[in-house]
Image (cartoon, rainbow, N blue to C red):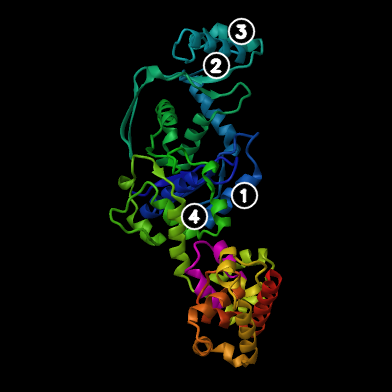
C-alpha cells in the first residue's frame, strides 16, 4: 500500500534529535512503500515561531539526507480553511460557541480544584438556547468555538502500542477556535492532514491524548481516519527525557561536533527500532528495505552519546583521506589553515594515520594540528618522564645534529628514517624507546601520537629541526 506520511515540526527552535528520529522513521516508511513524505511547518504560534528556526530545521533535514515531496507546507497559510471547517462543525451542531471569559474559566478551575473534582469544562455554554446565543452575539461578546464531545468512546489500533481505548466522558469539550479567531492545533492538524492526503500519522507518544480528540474530529466530519503510531520518547542516560542538560540534543549541535550525517541517521534508526539481528551499521538503502513498524519498541530508548561516537568513528575510519578533505575544510578553516596546505601529500598521509585515533571530524581536525603548528607546551607527565633525565638535553642536541646532517631526500623514506633512528640509538647504547619517547614529546608536545617514523616523515626536515630546538630551549629554561 502506498502511504502518505508527514513530518510537522514547530519552528520555535532547533531540530531536536527526537524530532529528527520521527522524521527519519516517516521518511523510511514513505520511501519503502513508494508513497510520499510531506513536510509541514506548524507555524501558527506567532509569538514563538521564527524564520531562523524554520531555516535551521530545513537545513538539518537536508543535512540528514531527508528529501520531501512537493513544496514545504506552512500551516499558517491555511487558516481560512481551518475556520471554514470550524464553521461547518458549528452548522452541523458538532461544535458550539463558548462565551465564558478567561476569568470565569479560571474560577471554574479553582472551584473544581478545591472540591477535588475532575478539572474539565462544565459545559456552561453547551446548552445555551439559540436566543441566548443571538443575544450574546448581538452584544458583541467574544467567543471561542468548542467541539461537542459525543457520548461513547474513542478506539484506535496504535501501530506500535496496540489497541487504545478512552471513554469520552473523560474528555473536555475542547476548544478548536480561540476567541481571537485563531484555530487551535487539534483542528488545524486534522484539517491539514486530511487535505494533504495523509493516511499514516507517526509521531511521539506524547501525542496520544491529542489523537483521541483528533479522531473525534475526523468522525464528526465524516472523513477517513488515518492510521496512527506513537513512538516512545528518547531518554538520556539518567532515564529522564533527553534535553540540553544531557549535552548535545539537536541535530545542529551534533553536526557542529563533527558527526557524520549518515552516522547520526544510522544511530537514530536504532533508537527504538531493532533490525532483528546484531548488525548495527546500515546504508540508507538497506534501512529503507529493512525498516518495519512492527519492530519499533514500545518502551523508551536511551540516547548513549558514547555509542554514537563509536559509530561515527566507524564511518570516519572507512573514508579515505581524499574523501575526508571536504568534510574537514570547515574545521580547518576555523583554525586559519589555507586550502593550499591541504594538498600536501604528507598532510593526506597524516589524515590516514590520525583518522583511526579520532571519533569526530572536529577531533580529527585537532589531531591534524601537529602538521601545521609547533607545540606551545609539553605534557607535564612527559616532561617528568622524558625531559628531566640527566642526559635529556644532550640527547636532544645530538638528535638535532643528526637530523640536520640528513638530506631532504632522507625525510621522504619512512623505512630509511626508521633504520637511521634505530642505528642512532644503538650507537649510544640506548634502547629505541629511550630515543623515540623524548623525540615524540619534542615534535608533538604529547606522549601519544602516530608512529614516530611516520611522524618524522609528516613533519619534514625544517619543522623537525625547529621543534627539537624549541624543546632544547625549553629544557635549558627548566635547568
Could you tell me if the residues under marks 3 and 2 are in contact, i.e. CB atoms within 8 Å?
A: no
Could you tell me if the residues under marks 4 and 2 are in contact, i.e. CB atoms within 8 Å?
A: no
C-alpha gap between disc 3 and disc 4 = 54 Å
C-alpha gap between disc 1 and disc 2 = 38 Å
Q: Nearer the viewer, mark 3 or mark 2?
A: 2
Tell me the number on the disc at residue 55: 1
Along the line of sight, the residue nearer the viewer: 450 or 196 = 450
> In the rendered image, which residue does mark 2 sit on?
97
Q: Secondary structure at mark 1?
A: helix
Circle 2 Cα neighbour tier, 10 Å, few/some/many (<14 / 14–19 / ≥20):
many
Q: Earlier in the sequence, mark 3 or mark 2?
A: 2
Along the line of sight, the residue nearer the viewer: 50 or 216 = 50
Q: Quadrant of the C terminus?
A: bottom right
Q: Nearer the viewer, mark 4 or mark 2?
A: 4
Residue at the (52%, 33%) spot, across then down? 188
Circle 3 Cα neighbour tier, 10 Å, few/some/many (<14 / 14–19 / ≥20):
few
Q: Secondary structure at mark 4?
A: loop
Q: Earlier in the sequence, mark 3 or mark 4?
A: 4
> In the rendered image, which residue does mark 4 sit on?
66
Q: Earlier in the sequence, mark 4 or mark 1?
A: 1
Residue at the (44%, 44%) spot, across then down? 237
Along the line of sight, the residue nearer the viewer: 227 or 238 = 238
Task: Where is residue 298? Give x, y as percent.
Answer: 34, 40
Task: Indicate left or right for 240 with 60 as reference.
Answer: left
Circle 1 Cα neighbour tier, 10 Å, few/some/many (<14 / 14–19 / ≥20):
few
Q: Earlier in the sequence, mark 4 or mark 2?
A: 4
> In the rendered image, which residue does mark 3 sit on?
135
Amino acid at each position: 500500500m502506498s502511504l502518505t506520511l508527514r513530518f510537522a515540526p514547530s519552528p520555535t527552535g532547533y531540530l531536536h534529535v527526537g524530532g529528527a528520529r520521527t522524521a527519519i522513521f516517516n521518511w523510511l516508511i514513505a520511501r519503502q512503500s513508494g508513497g510520499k513524505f510531506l513536510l509541514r511547518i506548524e507555524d501558527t504560534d506567532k509569538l514563538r515561531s521564527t524564520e531562523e528556526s524554520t531555516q535551521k530545521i530545513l537545513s538539518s533535514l537536508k543535512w540528514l539526507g531527508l528529501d520531501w515531496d512537493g513544496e514545504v507546507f506552512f500551516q499558517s497559510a491555511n487558516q481560512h480553511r481551518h475556520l471554514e471547517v470550524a464553521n461547518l462543525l458549528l452548522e452541523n451542531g458538532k461544535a458550539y460557541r463558548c462565551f465564558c471569559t478567561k476569568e470565569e474559566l479560571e474560577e471554574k478551575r479553582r472551584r473544581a480544584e478545591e472540591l477535588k473534582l475532575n478539572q474539565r469544562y462544565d459545559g456552561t455554554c453547551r446548552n445555551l438556547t439559540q436566543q441566548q446565543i443571538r443575544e450574546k452575539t448581538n452584544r458583541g461578546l467574544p467567543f471561542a468555538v468548542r467541539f461537542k464531545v459525543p457520548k461513547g468512546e474513542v478506539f484506535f489500533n496504535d501501530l506500535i502500542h496496540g489497541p487504545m481505548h478512552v471513554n469520552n466522558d473523560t474528555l473536555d469539550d475542547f476548544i478548536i477556535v480561540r476567541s481571537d479567531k485563531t484555530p487551535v492545533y487539534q483542528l488545524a492538524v486534522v484539517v491539514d492532514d486530511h487535505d494533504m492526503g495523509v493516511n499514516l500519522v507517526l509521531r511521539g507518544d506524547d501525542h496520544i491524548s491529542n489523537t483521541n480528540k483528533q479522531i473525534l474530529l475526523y468522525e464528526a466530519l465524516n472523513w477517513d481516519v488515518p492510521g496512527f503510531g506513537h513512538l516512545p520518547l528518547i531518554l538520556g542516560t539518567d532515564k529522564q527525557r533527553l534535553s540540553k542538560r544531557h549535552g548535545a540534543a539537536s541535530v545542529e549541535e551534533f553536526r557542529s561536533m563533527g558527526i557524520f550525517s549518515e552516522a547520526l541517521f544510522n544511530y537514530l534508526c536504532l533508537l527504538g527500532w531493532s533490525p532483528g539481528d546484531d548488525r548495527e551499521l546500515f546504508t540508507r538503502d538497506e534501512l529503507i528495505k529493512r525498516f518495519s513498524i512492527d519492530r519499533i519498541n514500545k518502551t523508551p530508548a536511551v540516547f548513549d552519546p558514547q555509542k554514537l561516537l563509536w559509530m561515527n568513528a566507524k564511518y570516519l575510519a572507512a573514508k579515505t583521506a581524499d574523501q575526508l578533505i571536504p568534510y574537514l575544510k570547515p574545521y580547518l578553516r576555523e583554525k586559519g589553515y589555507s586550502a593550499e596546505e591541504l594538498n600536501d601529500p604528507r598532510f593526506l598521509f597524516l589524515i590516514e594515520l590520525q583518522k583511526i585515533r579520532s571519533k569526530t571530524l572536529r577531533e580529527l581536525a585537532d589531531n591534524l594540528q601537529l602538521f601545521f603548528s609547533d607545540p606551545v607546551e609539553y605534557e607535564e607527565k612527559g616532561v617528568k618522564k622524558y625531559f628531566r633525565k640527566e642526559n635529556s638535553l644532550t640527547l636532544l642536541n645530538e638528535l638535532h645534529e643528526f637530523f640536520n646532517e640528513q638530506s631532504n631526500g632522507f625525510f621522504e623514506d619512512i623505512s630509511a628514517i626508521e633504520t637511521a633512528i634505530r642505528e642512532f640509538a644503538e650507537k649510544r647504547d640506548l634502547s629505541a624507546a629511550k630515543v623515540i619517547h623524548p623525540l615524540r614529546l619534542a615534535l608533538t608536545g604529547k606522549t601519544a601520537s602516530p608512529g614516530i617514523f611516520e611522524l618524522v616523515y609528516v613533519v619534514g626536515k625544517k619543522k623537525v629541526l625547529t621543534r627539537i630546538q624549541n624543546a632544547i630551549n625549553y629544557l635549558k629554561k627548566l635547568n
